[in-house]
Image (spheres, rainbow, N blue to C red):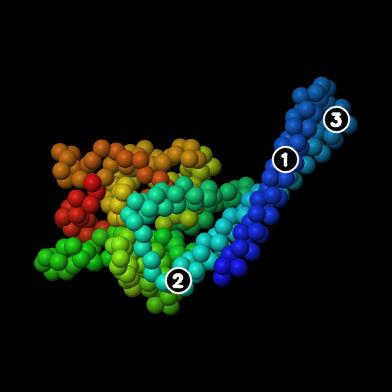
Amino acid sequence: MELELMEKVNELSEICKEVAEGRCSSQVSSLEWGQVKVHKGKHSVEQKRLWNKKLQEVFHDLGSLQKALLRAQDKIFDLRALEHKIKIAKGPRNMRRGVLMSLLQESAKSIPMWAGGVDEPPPPLCGAIGAGNNLDTNLVAPGDYVAALVPDLECPDAEFAPNESWILAEVISFNREKRQFQVEDVDAEEGKVPKRYTLDRSKVILLPKWKANPVLNPDAVYHKGTLVLALYPQTTCFYRAVVDTYPTHAQDEYSLYFEDPSYPDGYAPSIRIPQRYVILCPETDHKSTRQGRNRLSGRKS
């Protein structure tokens, strides 16, 4: 599998070279078209023909560049899937918490921005657009990050049923017929085997695979006042929060008020959270939040 990994890396490298060449070509075409437009003077028939020709060349170059970028994106997804297979083959391995936190931050930065065609709507798992009820196996793959509702082993004194918490987990497998996930807690204690859970579809929420560009797709971001679940900084737990400000530009993050009963108004000061770790709060989440998670408030610090 390591050999296959190297082959795919080389393929990605070739695509990147193609992208670089295409970018130079599109810049030249744009410059030439700009010169035609600036010096056009009065619109003669020949000038209009030349103008239209250059404009078509610009569109063609940009279209080719977009296709190459999308191929590079697909190749990156293939690399991630292959890396996950290698990880599984080598067996469980945990890491220091500081390294894990750094990897989670990098994951938030590295997910691609959705770039569709003209008037093409963003797909499921782009920003605030969920996976929906009819989960397609194309949307979920081993190694994907999800929010998983699991029994809270730190609260064994629940009166009627174990308290549950939303944690960050990694998909091991998905059984479409049974609508069940097998997931693994990403935050394994050092020296111990990571915990695995078999969960119904209702207890798993897929995280966004693409960032939404709010300029082009304003409906793909959560707006002010929306109740969400978000990964609290320096933890692997999702907590309830309310959107204060939402992204208005491509690289913006959310500003969220997390619920916290230790504050007079019930909310902590706003914190910035990337799109990658913000999901819609399920309507049934009140069963596992206010009382159950308050006992874990120390994990937020």
Residue 211, percent from left and from top: 48, 48
Read off the residue under disc 1.
24
Tell me which label, 2 or 3, sits earlier in the chain: 3
Could you tell me which residue is drawn at 53 percent across and 50 percent down?
112
Q: Secondary structure at mark 2?
A: helix
In the image, 183 versus 3, the foreground residue is 3
Going by the numbered disc 1, the residue's amino acid type is: Cys
Residue at 41% over, 67% down:
171
**Mark whose residue sits in front, 2 or 3:** 2
Any part of residue 202 in sight: no
Q: Quadrant of the N terminus?
A: bottom right
Q: Is residue 200 above or below residue 21?
A: below
Can you identify the residue that label 2 sits on?
A: 90
Q: Position of residue 164 (x, y in %)?
A: 23, 63
* Amino acid on which disc 3 is placed: Gln
Give left or right: position of 166 versus 100. left
Residue at the spot of label 3: 47
Residue under the image location 24 percent in, 66 percent down:
151
Residue 248 on image: x %, y %: 46, 37
Residue at (61, 59) in percent of width and height = 9
- For the residues labelled 1 and 3, the Cα–Cα distance comes to 25 Å
Which percent across, then down, holds residue 158?
Answer: 13, 65
Q: Which of the two marks, 2 or 1, is nearer to us in this view? A: 2
Above or below, 195 relative to 111: below
Say few, some or many: other residues with alpha carbon within 10 Å of mark 3 (under 14 / 14 to 19 / 20 or more): some
Between 11 and 249, which is closer to the camera in this rendering? 11
Cα distance between the residues tagged 2 and 1: 42 Å
Q: Taking 86 as reference, is 56 left or right?
A: right
Q: Given this view, does label 1 or label 3 mark the residue nearer the observer? A: 1
User: In this orientation, does residue 258 appear?
Assistant: yes
Where disc 3 sits, the SS reads: helix
